[in-house]
Image (cartoon, grey):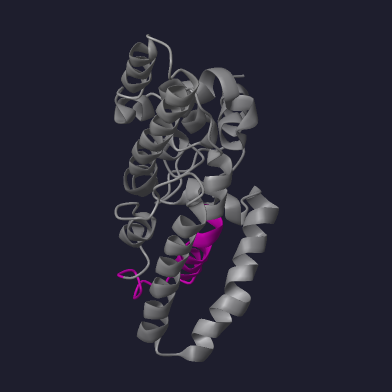
Amino acid sequence: MYDKDIWYIANYIYHTVVYSKENFQCNHLSLNEICKSLTTESYDFQSLLENISQRVSPIFYVWFYFKEAKRNNFNHLINNEAFGTILNFQNSQFDNIGDEKTLFQSIEDRVQDTLQKLKEVMDDDAWYDSILIHGIPDIQNRLIEQYSIRPEDILSFCCGHGVLDQFVEPFMRKLITILKNLKIEEVKKALSEYKDINNTISRIENLGRRDVKTMLNTSLIYLLLYNAVENQQMQEIKDKLARELN
């Protein structure tokens, strides 16, 4: 995938180490900083993204299997568009903090639907079963052993635009609205007798009106300046640059 001393330009993994820079924009550390900036509240993006990664990982491993086997006859089912469809947040049921399990189940259902379509197109139950029983575990173990890529890391290696555009950005917009409304209700209860309650509510609303897309586009700054040491891929880039410059 990449060598410690050589930059590889491949179809899905670039000198960014992850799929593309958009995957860094979806890093849980950066997303939480944006969330705090817009609402003053934190959210467990790490748990969210790791749960989703684990659920979409079978599709990634199947795609990886076919790439290694040089089988292109299933590209119409397992591709970037399919990943985007599986991750699509539009019309997902997420109206309150705590609806994450429903969201996870929706994604898992789409994964199973995609795998079922693949099984029908393959028309070879023995081959399909062998991929799930032997092929996927083998790929999973190799990625862990060689690159420390776990099932919960898979979103970093899926199409970045799909992750960002189909899930992260619309999810962030919905989350900001939920957290903003919760904050306003909290203020109404705590300051119900104070004259400046409307000013406090206005400040909360104005804080959350800043453009999410713009903040996501500049979210790399959080990794570059503050949290790079906590991000394995960003640290690998810095280490590699240091070696090459020396």
- Position of residue 115 relative to residue 96, above or below, is below
Q: Left or right: where does residue 54 sit relative to residue 192?
A: right
What is the span of residues highlighted in magenta in the rendered image? 53-76
Residue 18: x and y, percent?
49, 42
Question: Taking the image as drawn, is residue 10 in sight?
Answer: yes
Question: Residue reaching furthest top?
Answer: 195
Residue 17: x and y, percent?
51, 40
Examine the structure image and report whether residue 54 is included in the region drawn in magenta. Answer: yes
- Position of residue 68 relative to residue 123, above or below, is above
**Figure label count:** 0
Question: Residue reaching furthest front?
Answer: 193
Q: Quadrant of residue 217?
A: top left
Q: Nearer the viewer, residue 177 or 36?
A: 177
Q: Nearer the viewer, residue 81 or 187?
A: 187
Residue 98: x and y, percent?
51, 48
Residue at x 43% of width, y 49% of height: 10
Quadrant including the C terminus:
top right
Residue at x 64% of width, y 49% of height: 147
Question: Taking the image as drawn, is residue 71 in sight?
Answer: no
Examine the structure image and report whether residue 239 is included in the region drawn in magenta. Answer: no
Q: What secondary structure is the magenta-colored segment mainly?
A: helix
- Position of residue 192 relative to residue 70, above or below, is above
Residue at x 38% of width, y 32% of height: 181
Residue 94: x and y, percent?
40, 50
Q: Nearer the viewer, residue 44 or 147?
A: 44
- Position of residue 76 relative to residue 120, above or below, is above
Residue at x 60% of width, y 33% of height: 231
Q: Nearer the viewer, residue 93 or 234?
A: 93
